[in-house]
Amino acid sequence: MASFRDSEFARPPRAGEEPRAELDLYLARRFLPLAPGVVALADWSAQNLAWAKRRFAGAEFVFLTRSALNEEIVRRFGRRLSDEAIHGLDRQSPLLSARRVVTKRQAAALALAGAGLLALACARPSFLVVALVALMSALFLLGVFFRAALALAGSVPRDAGPVAADNDLPVYTILVPLYREAAMIPALTRALLALDYPCDRLDIKLIVEADDPDTARACAELDGPFEVVGVPPSLPRTKPKAVNFALNFARGDFVVIYDAEDRPEPDQLRKAVGAFRLLPESVACLQARLAFYNARENWLTGQFEADYRLWFGMLLPGLDRIGMPIPLGGTSNHFRAGILRRVGAWDPFNVTEDADLGIRLAQAGFSVAMLDSTTFEEAPTRLSVWLKQRSRWLKGYMQTWLVHSRATPSLARGSGLRGVFAFHFFIGGAVLSAIVNPLLWGVCALSLVFPGLFPDHAAAVSAWGALGSNSVLVGLVTSAAIRCGDRKLLPCGLTVVLYWLLISLAAYRGLWHLITKPFHWEKTAHGLSRQAAEDGDA
C-alpha cells in the first residue's frame, strides 16, 4: 500500500530562525517585527499596546489588520508551520499516525491470514465456504445488535446543561476550512454572526488554500471578527492539514470546527462553555448533534437525515452514556484548546480525522461527551456527490481501525477493555457490515437461483445473517425517526435496505482508494440544494 513520503514543505526549521516560543509570542500578542525599530501590531487594545511599548521602547508601530498580519506571518514562517502541521503527530506518536497505512506486523498478519485461507481452500473448500459465511453472519449480527444496545442506552434523555452568561465568557476560536467555497461565504457569515456570543470574544479563522483565489477574495471583503489564514500549498491536500496549520493562530480557550455550509444553533457556544465548566477536565471535547436543513429534497437526503438521526440522536449518546470512546463527526466538535494541542491535534493523513481524533483522545485518557445543541448542514442531493463523500468516510474509518488496532494496549489503558470492544464493534463493525452485507445477500440469492451451488448450511446461514441484520437496521432507523418526532422519515426506515446497499458500494470504492490513494481527499461539493441556492441569493 502507498504511504506518504515527503512534501514541498517537509523540512526541519532552518538554522537562525526564531525559536518556536518567539513565534508563539507573535501569534498571541498579534505583532511582528518588520525591521529594526519597526513593529507591526494588529491588536491595539490598551493592554497590548502598553506591553508592546515596554518591550520595544522607542520603536515605530505600524497598524496591520489581523488578516494582513496573519499573511505576513505565513509568508515568513509558512514552511515551518506547514512542516509541523504535516508531520507533528507522526513525530509525536508515529504509531497513531495514518501516514503508515499498515505496519510491518499488520502486513505480516494479513499475509499469514491469506496464506491460511488459501491452504484451507485447497484442502477443504466446502468447509471454508460455510465457515466464512457463518463468521460474516455472526459478526454482522453482533455488530447490529451492539448498535441496538447503544440505541437503547442513548434513547434515555439527559438534562440539558447550563447556558453560560455574558460575564466572564472566554475567547472562543472558530475554525472554518474552506476550499472553492466562495458561493457559500454570504450564508456562512450570516450563520456565524447569528451566534449569541460577544463579538469581541469571537476568534473566527477562515482557512483558505493558496490556490483558491475566488474564496480568498470573498473572505478578504469581510470585517468584524473574521480573520483569513492562508494555507501554503503542500501535500497531503486534506482538511486536517489545513486546520492543523490554522490552529497555530487560534487564541481561544476553546476551539470549534464548522464547515462552509453549517448553521449552528445560536446558543451553541454558550452551551459548550457552560458544559465544559460543569464537566470534569478529562472531558476534552463536546460533540453537537448534526442534522440537515434540506432533508425533504429527495429520497437520498431523507435517508441521510434518517441515518444522522440514528447516529447523533441515539448511537453516539449511547456511547457517551456508557463511557466508551466516541468517534467525532466532521463538524461542531468543541475542544479544550490546550488538550487538543497536547494530543497532536488532527492527523493530516487520515481522511476522517474527526473519528480518529475521538479515539485518540481516548488513547490519551480523555473523553468526549455529547452537547445538547444542533448544527444544520446540507445533505448531498446527488448520488455522485454522496458516493464520493461516503467513500471517503469509510476509507477513513478503515484507516482509523488500522491505526488504533495496532495500539490496542494503550487504548485499553485509556478506556479499558470495554472501550477496546466498543471501538472494534463500532468502527470496525461499521466497515465490516458494509463489506459483508452484499456478500450475504449474494450467497442467499445465488443459492435460490442455483440450488446446490453452495453447501446447504452456507445458504441458510447467509439468509439468517442478511435478513436478520437488515431487519434490525430497519427497526433502528424507524425507531430513531419515531423518537425524534419526525414521522415523515418513517418511509426512509422501510427502504433503508436499499440505502445500505449503496453504502456497501461506497465501502468497496473506499477500500480500493485505501489501496491506491490512501490520502486523497475527495471534496464534497456544497451549495447544490434548492435551500442552499435560496440562502445564497438572500
Image (spheres, rainbow, N blue to C red):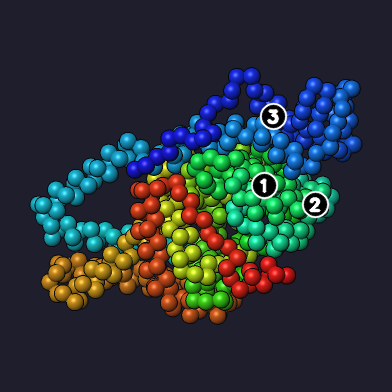
**Dot 3 alpha-carbon crowd within 10 angstroms: few under 14, some 14 to 19, many 20 or more:** some
Residue 171 screen position, x and y as percent: 76, 45
Cα distance between the residues tagged 3 and 2? 25 Å
- Report the residue marked by disc 1: 255
Residue 253 in view (yes/no)? no
Disc 1/disc 3 C-alpha distance (Å): 20 Å
Q: Nearer the viewer, mark 1 or mark 3?
A: 3
Q: In this image, 235 relative to 507: left or right?
A: right
Q: Which residue is mark 3?
A: 23
State the CA–CA distance, disc 1 to disc 2.
18 Å
The secondary structure type at the circle numbered 2 is loop
SS assignment at label 1: strand
Name the one closer to the observer, 328 or 67: 67
The amino acid marked with disc number 2 is Gly
Give coordinates of residue 451: x percent, y percent: 14, 75
Q: Residue at x 78, y 50 (%)?
A: 225
Residue pictured at 69% horizontal, 52% vertical: 217
User: Residue 93 location in percent, x, y?
Assistant: 49, 34
Disc sitting over residue 224 in the figure: 2
> Is residue 57 among what the camera can see?
yes
Q: Amino acid at mark 3?
A: Leu
In this rendering, the answer to whether 264 lies above or below 362 is: below
Find residue 474 and report its image quarter: bottom left
**Tag 3's secondary structure?**
helix
Count the labels in the image. Answer: 3
